[in-house]
Amino acid sequence: MSADALGARLRDEVHEETLEEFLRTLRGRHDPSPPPLGIPPLDRLCSSDPTRSSATHAPVLQISGPSCTGKTHLVYYILALTVLPSRFRSVSLPSTKDATAVILDTDSRFCIARLKQCMASYITQHAPGPIPPASTEDFDSYNTDLDHTLRTALMQIHVFRPQSSAALLATLEQLESYLFSATPSHRCAARPLGLVAVDSASAFYWPDKLSAEDDTATALGTAGPPATSSFVKTHQTIVSGLRSLRLRFGCVVVVSSWILGAGSGTEDYAHLPGVWAGFQTMTVKVDKEDVARFGLGMSAEEAVRDRKARQEVVDRGKFVGYVMGERYGGRGRMGMHFCIALNGIVVAD
């Protein structure tokens, strides 16, 4: 065998990969566990999922449900865990990451004041403040430290408000260069990207459907096979952009979506294209906890007598999350309970 042929054969046996791929593989060997969501019941299901393609891939969570069922509050909760520090006043804060987060607020309803409430509630649950007869100085010191921690954490959040699918796609395309453009002195430069959240993927559903129908009407009568709907193409591009960010930064992706229709129980009225099903690793359908209905033979007096107890159940703001999919033991497996109160959100372990 000639030297040229031998050299060519040896060259073909060399495995080539980019620096990004090498660093991702190296990180997976040293820290094989994927970044958690921070919600213990869901993290346990993620870690036990046999279909996960790689242990180094961060989870992709879709939160779906009807209106007013706590979808955005769950996004707030995961967002708070992403940006809060691991310790507050020498007390450990479980599941926090001290990372940077990106929120794509397509519904234009992201409330920084409410997020701050949820963050403060999480801190005080695990690191309660002083109690009487503590001095005024103790209370002031605690509140000062709490305010400083909250302000520092809130500075790690990048909020974008695209007003159309085209604007959302443009944001996703430019997000990587935006994050890498931060100077070394920037407050987020030294922190990893821990979360990209889209609230919600359904925001432009009707305008996109109308545009797709107009395109279909225009294409009627043209020769050739039917083209892929512009609605599907749009979502394919959105998923591609999120997938690229997930692989690039190793970050968790959380997407909320509506459920259209008058479903009940664990029935799911999916309306997003199937491309999302191949991207997400877990879908949680959230809904309000059922309140027992009045009995068939109950009198008006009995109903009035039970009214206070029933109202107390409603006021507790209890919600449930059903993990959807055969890989988790069938449709509608109970995954989590959480409560939404005036001062924040509490997720049961």
Image: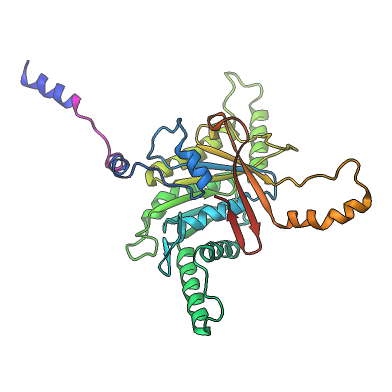
Quadrant in which residue 96 is drawn: bottom left
Q: Out of 21 and 316, give the one closest to the viewer.
A: 316
Give the farthest residue toward the bottom.
Answer: 136
Image coords of residue 328 (percent x, y): 54, 33
Give the magenta-colored segment's residue range: 13-23
* Residue 183 to residue 41: above or below: below
Image coords of residue 56 (percent x, y): 37, 40
Image coords of residue 242 (percent x, y): 47, 42
Q: Out of 323 and 155, give the one closest to the viewer.
A: 323
Residue 312 placement, left or right of 208: right
Give the residue displayed 37% in from the left and 64% down from the top: 186
Residue 237 placement, left or right of 179: right
Is any atom of residue 161 visible in this view?
no
Q: Out of 287 and 99, give the one closest to the viewer.
A: 287
Is any atom of residue 14 visible in this view?
yes
Quadrant in which residue 306 is drawn: bottom right
* Residue 7 to residue 302: above or below: above
Give the residue displayed 33% in from the left and 66% down from the top: 185
Image coords of residue 290 (percent x, y): 73, 45
Residue 4 placement, left or right of 275: left
Give the farthest residue toward the right.
Answer: 300
Does the magenta run of residues contain 19?
Answer: yes
Q: Out of 101 and 281, give the one closest to the viewer.
A: 281
Residue 271 placement, left or right of 81: right
Q: How is the image coloured?
A: rainbow
Quadrant (top left/top right/bottom left/bottom right) for the N terminus:
top left
